[in-house]
Amino acid sequence: MSTTSSHPNLVALLTIARREVMRILRIWAQTLVPPAITMTLYFLIFGSLIGSRIGDMGGYNYMDFIVPGLVMMSIIQNSYGNISSSFFGAKFGRHIEEMLVSPMPNWVILGGYVAGAVLRGVLVGVIVLGIAMLFTHVRIPHPVVTITTVLLGATIFSLAGFVNAVYAKKFDDVAIVPTFILTPLTYLGGVFYSVKMLPDWAQTMTHANPVFYMVNAFRYGLLGSSDIPVGIAYALMIGFVIVLGALSLWLLKRGIGLRS
Amino acid sequence: MPMSQTPALEIRDLRKVYAGGVEALKGVSLDVHPGDFFALLGPNGAGKSTLIGIVSSLVNASSGSVKVFGVDIEQDREAAMRLLGLVPQEVNFNFFEKPFEILCNYAGFYGIPRAEAKLRAEQELRRAQLWDKAQTTARTLSGGMKRRLMIARAMMTRPRLLILDEPTAGVDIEIRRGMWRTLKEVNAAGTTVILTTHYLEEAESLCRNLAIIDGGHIIENGPMKTLLAKLDVEGFLLDIDGDLPTELPHIEGVIIHAEDSHTLDLEMPRAMVLNSVFASLDGAGIRVRSMRTKTNRLEELFVRLTGAKEVAA
């Protein structure tokens, strides 16, 4: 019989999270370096070269204004990409079976993968924000809002990436969603502009975009201003976490894409 | 039922219909007793892997029940899985990880603390003769090493029931015999072992009981000795001193034909005394220099059972 811990689920969750972190560090050139390079280029081109001709936006110079959106964009893309590629890779390589035959409850499997993806999102966010602070005057006036928004945003897109990976049957399936859904949502979520610049109909449509709430809550945390009340952003982000978390657990329980 | 009498594996009326309508299991019932070394045999597509998949919770059953040491896998999956170890047919560890990490992580999934997992990983890797490969990327291991690593991984949790799905497929004879020794040790230490294999001499030499599954049904189930005793004929190859005569002798009840000019192929009832056969051969001027059993007995039984069913179908 196994000599199990008095908290076997905690041990199991930490094992998955640890394995994910080891994976992120093992392939650091693919996971940590590209966002740093991309964001440095964004700041140089959009912030410095083009931004200096745009002038102020939302009461801030353009380079400061785009920092929250760009950092949040990195967090979203990396959280999503981490879990979708890692979980689908485990399915593809069949080592997901190591977990499926174990006594781990489904919430531990989900929690471990989400923890790993959120950690990558946070790690990338810290790197990108560090680079941003070299170029701008952003200084985090609301750290609690900043941290909670990062965690909620990373969790939402980790869960979305998990759902994508569960349904994916080939590697193309985990690449299609970021290209055709995630990128448009991010670019149209107020990363590069204030929603107040848009016509009424476009403003209304933007309110259906979850990225818009994350970017604005994060902008409040970093700059102290937002296009929407932060409370509404929190309510919606928590709502997304609950809905996507419930969907993920349901998929695991039914074994969709995992058990025949 | 007293605890000692609780089957290690109790399957009742298990059915599986895959999406698309393929009926892989058509009401399988089976008991495997604690401490047994049990063979589950069947041709390709018979339902063996589906059965193992359901027991290890990788496949959802359509109906029926499975209990591991009395624990129903539907009602208390976590407790049942804690008792079970699986060595699957296909290699299913992360090729980019190292054997030591693979074993420690696997133990972690079962809630075994890291410090304990590291100790066990060293023990199991040494037993599998893989300790020198502990920090090598798993994809560089040979086929035999990968299979030994999967056995070592399953043993990390000290399972009471170990299921091995063709663990020696594609492994050379030396490594295979090493794996047999390991499995015998594991079984002798009290672990119930269920083995599927296409090497029937492997099943005959290791297992005490067996079931043969074909077309989603159990068509035979019982002690190895009892089932082998059902074979009513035996086959031999006789090496002849000198050339065979052009006319072979007729021996009542014996089918006899020349394999080549120096070898006789002989099939006779098990109840028949060999001396009478040799006497008849001697009378015909045929001197036997040596003899060999023509086929593995279990293989003969297997072919007859599964082959007969195919003809009947």
Image (cartoon, coloured by chain):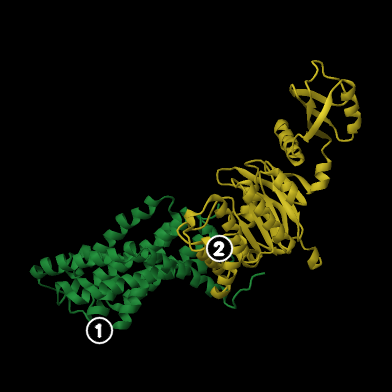
What colour denotes chain B? Answer: yellow
- Image-based side of A196 in relation to B208, left or right: left
Q: Secondary structure at mark 2?
A: helix
At x 67%, y 59%, the residue is B162
Tell me, for residue B131, which label it has, or none: 2
Give the camera-side residue of A131 and A208.
A131
What colour denotes chain A? Answer: green
- Image-based side of A31 in relation to B81, left or right: left
Residue highlighted by disc 1: A141
Amino acid found under the numbered disc labelled 2: Trp
Q: Is residue B202 above or below residue A151?
A: above
Q: Is residue A105 visible?
A: no
Give the camera-side residue of A133 and B271.
B271
Depth-wise, is mark 1 or mark 2 nearer the camera? 2
Q: Secondary structure at mark 1?
A: loop
Q: Is residue B76 visible?
A: yes
Subunit that carries the residue with mark 2: B
